[in-house]
Structure formats: C-alpha cells, structure tokens
Image: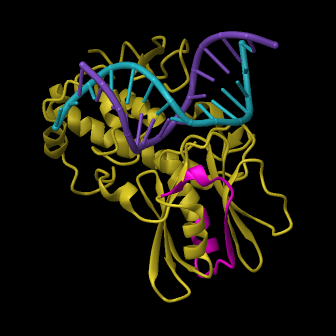
Chain colours: A yellow, B purple, C cyan
Amino acid sequence: MPELPEVEVLVRHLAPRLQGRRILEATVHRARSVRPQSAEQMTEALQGATLESVSRRGKYLCFGLRSGQGTSLSCVGHLGMTGRMYLQPLMAPLPKHAVVTWRFADARFVFEDARGFGRLNLETTPIAALGPEPFDPSWTPERLVERLGNSRQPIKVKLLDQHLMAGVGNIYASEALHQAGISPRRPSGRLGLKDAAALLQALQSVLSRAIELGSRATLDFKGGGDGLFYYGSSSELEGVPVVERFDVYDRAGEPCRRCGAVIRRTVQAQRSTYHCPQCQRR
DNA sequence: ATGGCTGTTATCCG
DNA sequence: CCGGATAACAGCCA
C-alpha cells in the first residue's frame, strides 16, 4: 500500500495522535528491521523520549523526538511493501509480525510488517539523497528534462528512482504516464518539454487525487481487506467503487476508460507496468 | 496444493 | 556513472 499518497494519509492520521506523547517503553521485536545499529541502542535511545513531530518525506515517515535528557532525535520509518503503523489499546494482543512497539501511558504504537521489507532508522541518512517532492514548486518542465539528462532508461523505470523524485511507486508511475499519454517504454532522455510538462501535471494530479480519496475514506489501519492502502474491505469510498481508483494499474485485458483499447501488462525492471497501447504510443 | 504474483530498495556486478 | 539482476520475505490467489 505504501506510495506517497498512502504515507501522507497515514502521517495525517498519526501526527495528532502521537504528538506530545512520551514513550514509556520501546521494544524491538524484529532486530533485522532496525537501523543503523543494534536493537538495544534503539530501545535505549527512545526510552523516555517525547514525540514532537510526525511528517513525511517521499515514502518515509519522519518522527521528531526529544529524549529524556533533552537532546533531539530523528527516527525515519519506511513501510516497505507490507508495513503498517497504528495505535492500539494497551491490552490488545500484538500482531504476529510486530517489528517495533512504543508503549505510551494509555495506548501502544505498533509498527508491523509481514514481509519485513520495511525499516525503522534511528537517524535520517535514508532520506538524505532523495530527489525533490513531486509537489516541490521548483519542478518545471525544463528542470525535469535536465534531470533526466540523456538517460536511456525507460521513463517508467526512471520514475521509480527515488533520487529523481521522491515518493512515486509502481502504481502511480503507471497511472501518471497513462494520464500524460506517454509510453512507459520511452527512453527518459528523449522526453521533450511538452512531455515533461504533461508528466509533471499528471504526477501531481494522480498523487493529489489519491491523497484526497484516502483522506475521505474510512480507513482501516490494522489492515485486512485487499492489502491495498488501508482501505480495508469497504467496496465504496464516497460513492467511488474501490476498483475504479485506477485507470490502468491491475487492469490488464480491460478497456481503457479514455479510448476503449485493451490495457496491457508488461514487465520492466522485474515489475509490472500497465499501459494503454492506444493512448500511450511510442 | 503448487506456483506465480505482490505496493520497495540496498547492494552487487559488468 | 549507469543500468540490470538479485536478495531480503510472507501471504494471497488461481
């Protein structure tokens, strides 16, 4: 579930619930998911710390804390493919794949992750080299073309590169290229200013729509459902059927909503790409 | 039930 | 530097 929009919705959910809370006890249940050093170091550092801020950078969640001794700490989390974060009652049983938990006076914060691709870092190095946010006002068609340089990598694959732009993942890369009318196989360096303008516009449109949709939904942060987002099993969000959230993603064999051509699934860099062969010609 | 698929990214190699 | 392949892993679905 976790590309930029899902992380943004989660951060908006967590921030008011975590801010000001003091961690009475931090527990690392899965040491392999914790960086940069030992589980003991993390639990010791976070013990007694107070949450001051929760924000997002790309697909990362950033926790600003103040230790018991008054020094400031930064914690950076990534959900990987299956990570989830939520608060639950103190008495509730821990999930099978708990990674880290923070006990507060009246609730417990849980980071769980079945596949274990997620991480919790006790410093900010993971976000140091990220590219600009998709909504960064400094993005212009000229800048995008410049950053793409003369790369021959297909644009779909390049959009997944977090050094170019932070937060775009497999779903929204396909969705944005479809909206922009650009073939996922186009070499990045061959996009013109017109393509770049359309792509920036499409990225912002697709991402902001997903944030809006997620913000209106009744979220089920503990999961279940189809595993996509935190949308749980509800089949409708404000009248929008869940299956219609995407125009091309996971719609192979179905008709393009714009032109009716059959959506195709291809594989690029070992990941599924979906596109309309009619609207997105090479 | 077995095999193929899944939202990510760090790292290694040529 | 660039780009491709792989590994890390559990669950779901046909």
Evaluate whether residue A177 shows in this view. Answer: yes
Relative placement, left or right, of A163 versus A170 is: left
Foreground residue among A67 and A184: A67
Evaluate whether residue A226 shows in this view. Answer: no
At 22% from the left and 39% from the top, the residue drawn is A197
For residue A260, above or below residue A229: above
Q: Looking at the picture, how far across and down is residue A168, in whole percent?
A: 40, 42
For residue A153, above or below residue A36: above
Image quarter of residue A42: bottom right
* Image mark count: 0
State the extent of the magenta-drawn residues as a range: A13-35
At 40% from the left and 63% from the top, the residue drawn is A124
Relative placement, left or right, of A8 versus C13 is: left
At 19% from the left and 36% from the top, the residue drawn is A148
Image quarter of residue A71: bottom left
- Magenta stretch: residue A250 in it? no
Relative placement, left or right, of A207 versus A132 is: right
Q: Quadrant of the image for the N terminus of chain A?
A: top right
Foreground residue among A171 and B10: B10
For residue A189, above or below residue A201: above
Q: Quadrant of the image for the C terminus of chain A?
A: top left
Relative placement, left or right, of A131 versus A241 is: left
- Magenta stretch: residue A34 in it? yes
